[in-house]
Image (cartoon, helix red, strand yellow):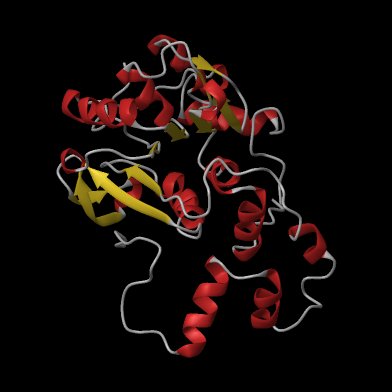
Amino acid sequence: MTDNSNNHAAGKPLNRAGHARRDALKFGSVATLGAILGGGALLGHATPVLAQAGSKAELAPNEPLNILIVNYDGGTLLDFAGPSEIFHRLPNTNVRYASLNGGNVTLEFGVVYGKTERLADIEQTDLILVPGGSDLSVPMRPEYQAQIRRLAEGAKHVTSVCNGSLVLAATGILNGKRSACHWAFINKLSEYGAIGVPDRFVEDDNGRFMSGGGVTAGIDFALRVAAKMRGQQAAEFTQLVIEYDPAPPFHSGHPRDARPEVIAMVDKELPGASRGLARVPGVR
């Protein structure tokens, strides 16, 4: 898996139909999207709703937005793949991926993600995103922490998904700040001076700090970030394009809903999880 591009698709030239589809999926109107999908019946009554102005965007349409996603060995793919899918579809937005030494990183389950940039080569970014992982040993190293802290201090927005908030908190940047985290690790945040909040999306300092809960919360998180940066209509358009219409088959995504025997299974795998104090390699 390799992706180090901005929002313009790489590879062989698109034909006319390909250009039309790509542009519609990124910037086009709902009417254009409806035509591509095969008619208005699929859209039903959604068009008038999506045509509303929605919330005011922080950025003007012509203002660029630079987003940096931090990668590292042991990271969880979905923590940043979900947000990446959304961010790449926003107008005038550039998404970059970086790791300490650049090149390939080996994520959880042996997934190799390639062609990342070197963190030291990136002077600054508007928004930094630190995803979580099953092993935080690498991003907790002093040299990694120094680069993340440098970029976070200069960013307009500092964000995380899942237990990536522990990585940010360890740098000191979240001291006294409210933050989300995966439910199994959320109470570890206080050991680094942050305030854990058991919500799917949390923001502090008028949105300078934004965070998503565990793994799949990255999609909800990214849509909220999109609405803040580019306005509600842009976020709703992106949600529709990717058909984010969750309907889980089981109500077992959080301890408040899961059956006791299922919670016990997770506690066996991650001791202390039900108390929000599960341990992850790299975190003391």
169, 125: nearer the viewer: 125
Q: Quadrant of the N terminus?
A: bottom left
Image coordinates of residue 266 in percent, x first then y, are 54, 31
Q: Quadrant of the C terminus?
A: top left
Residue beneath the point at 48% across and 89% down: 16
Q: Where on the picture, by quarter, is residue 145?
A: top left
The answer, for residue 256, to whether it is visible in the render is yes
- In the image, what residue occupies the spot 38% across and 12% down? 192
Q: Please provide percent x and percent y for residue 107.
A: 31, 47
Q: Which of 170 and 19 is in front in this view?
A: 19
Task: Say whether residue 27 is left or right of residue 246.
Answer: left
From where the camera sits, is residue 182 visible? no
Rendered position, 16 above or below 141: below
Question: How many numbered marks appear?
Answer: 0
Which residue shows up at 17% across the image and 48% down it? 102
Q: Which of 34 and 165 is in front in this view?
A: 34
Picture coordinates of residue 151, whole percent (x, y): 28, 32
Expressed as whole percent of the image width and height from the top left, the position of residue 238 reads 60, 59
Q: Identify which residue is drawn at 77% across, 71% down.
A: 43
Q: Vertically, is 142 above or below 116? A: above
